[in-house]
Image: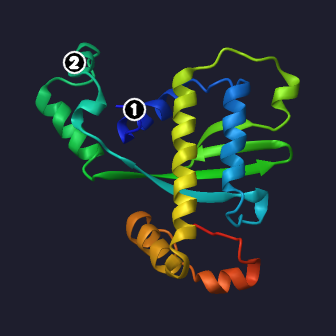
Amino acid sequence: MFGTAPWIDIILKYLKKWPAVAGSQINHLLMEIYQTMEPIQPVPEDAVRHLWIEVPCGTIEDCGNLDVYIDAGLIDSQEEFEREWLESYSEELKWYEITTTQYMEEKFLFINEELVFQFNDLYETKKEKEAEDEEIIVFLKLILAALKNEIKTVHQVGDETDCYLIEKSDCQKGTKDLNRQIYWDLFGPNAIRMN
């Protein structure tokens, strides 16, 4: 289950209901995610940066235990469980939009346009170390690794960046294409824009 789209979706539902308290390790990972996104050219207002990552959907077993869902009254049968799985995870991969932004000293992490964390780089000096949810730490490490991998892939495709971005963005996620050379002429060769 770890590292698959169903697992990520469960974590996101959990964070939406009960926002995690960012202890020092979580805050450190959030800052690393924010810094990993910095090579992406931001939208001018509030330093908004976007990047899409892909996560395998896994198998129906990754959705959890059928008996637990039936006991909780969430579904009535194996057939309904399978139908729900096919509706939610019909493709091999699921895409997640990762967005970072900043307002004054506060930084924000959004996933699929939902606020997941609010944090700042002053946190560790203000608060003592707190008990942290290990599953949230694993979740953030997965997001960080996926972001690093996606940025590395964009750098590796070199002259074919336009084709790669168009293939990954237009067809998969409905975002706008861009002309890398024109963008780099405007913002410099280290700028990456993923939206």
- For the residues marked 2 and 1, what is the alpha-carbon distance in whole angstroms? 22 Å
**Taking 65 as reference, is 189 above or below it?**
below
x then y, percent, for residue 117: 65, 36
Q: Is residue 18 above or below residue 150?
A: above
Residue behind mark 2: 70
Is residue 111 left or right of 127 when viewed as pictured? left
- Looking at the rendered structure, the secondary structure element under dot 2 is helix
**Residue 63, picture quadrant:** top left
Label 1 SS: loop
In this image, 91 relative to 146: left or right?
left
Sequence-wise first label, 2 or 1: 1
Q: Which residue appears at 52% of the width and 55% of the height?
A: 149
Nearer the camera: disc 2 or disc 1:
1
Residue 116 in view in this figure: yes
Q: Residue at x 75, y 44 (%)?
A: 107
Quarter of the image that includes the C terminus: bottom right
Depth order, front residue of 189/65: 189
> Residue at image x 39%, y 65%?
172
Q: Position of residue 4 (x, y in %)?
A: 37, 39
**Relative image position of residue 60 (x, y in whole percent):** 22, 35
- Decide: is 51 above or below 9: below
Q: Nearer the viewer, residue 162 or 87?
A: 162
Q: List the residue tagged with mark 1.
A: 2
Residue at 61% of width from left, 58% of height from top?
A: 50
* Colour theme: rainbow
Label 2 packing within 10 angstroms: few (<14), some (14-19), many (20+): some
**Corner quadrant of residue 64:** top left
- The amino acid on which the numbered mark 1 sits, given as a three-letter code, is Phe
| Residue type at the position of mark 2 | Ile
Q: Which mark is residue 159?
A: none
Looking at the rendered image, the quarter that the N terminus falls into is: top left
